[in-house]
Image (spheres, helix red, strand yellow):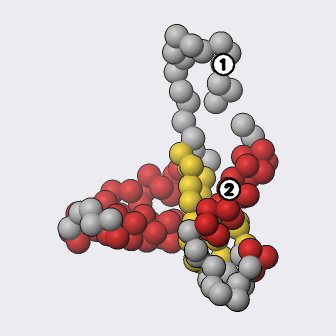
């Protein structure tokens, strides 16, 4: 799937998810939310969200979460740069990052039900 077609599918999904989870303020509409792809230079934002997600789920100690971020940092920078991981950020009307989501793209080997190459 090329990047343009992936954006066409993911943007509406992220907007739907953002709204369905109640992340809009009472006077905010979806028109106030901007979804854009994260740049490799924004990996600290992505790592902050990932760490916070695990913390909010009660997974890991402070030390384990800190270690996870340290270990993931170089991988995430490379993956955002080479496109094997793509992340989108949701920004409110003031430009503040309010959330995000990502997709890990990887080749997948054939299985007995495969009829055509995956294109990855």
Query: Which residue occupies the foreground of this view, 84 or 115?
Result: 115
Q: Position of residue 30 (x, y in %)?
A: 74, 74
Which residue is found at the position 46% from the left and 69% from the top?
49
The quadrant in which the C terminus is found is top right
Q: Is residue 4 above or below residue 21?
A: above
Which residue is found at the position 78% from the left and 51% from the top?
8
Which residue is found at the position 65% from the left and 12% from the top?
115
Q: Is residue 40 above or below residue 26?
A: above
Helix, strand or loop at label 2? It is helix
Q: Return the mark for residue 59.
A: none
Q: Is residue 74 left or right of residue 104?
A: left
Q: Is residue 80 something one can see in this rendering?
A: no
Q: Is residue 112 above or below residue 60?
A: above
Query: Which residue occupies the foreground of this view, 54 or 31?
Result: 31
Helix, strand or loop at label 1? It is loop
Which residue is found at the position 23% from the left and 63% from the top?
60
Q: Is residue 33 something one can see in this rendering?
A: yes
Q: Position of residue 44 (x, y in %)?
A: 48, 70
Q: Quadrant of residue 84?
A: top right
How many marks overall? 2
- How many angstroms separate mark 2 from mark 1 (CA)? 26 Å
Q: Position of residue 2 (x, y in %)?
A: 75, 40
The residue where tag 1 is placed is: 117
Q: Is residue 68 left or right of residue 101?
A: left
The quadrant in which the N terminus is found is top right
Q: Return the mark for residue 13.
A: 2
Q: Earlier in the sequence, mark 2 or mark 1?
A: 2
Q: Is residue 6 above or below residue 101?
A: above
Q: Are marks 2 and 1 in contact (CB under 8 Å)?
A: no
């Amino acid at each position: 799937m090329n990047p343009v077609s992936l954006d066409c599918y993911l943007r509406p999904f992220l907007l739907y998810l953002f709204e369905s989870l109640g992340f809009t303020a009472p006077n905010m509409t979806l028109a106030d939310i901007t979804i854009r792809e994260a740049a490799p230079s924004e990996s600290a934002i992505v790592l902050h969200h990932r760490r916070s997600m695990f913390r909010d789920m009660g997974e890991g100690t402070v030390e384990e979460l800190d270690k996870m971020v340290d270990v993931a940092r170089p991988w995430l920078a490379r993956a955002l740069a080479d496109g094997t991981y793509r992340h989108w950020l949701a920004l409110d009307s003031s430009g503040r990052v309010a959330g995000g989501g990502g997709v890990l793209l990887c080749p997948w080997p054939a299985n007995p039900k495969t009829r055509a190459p995956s294109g990855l």
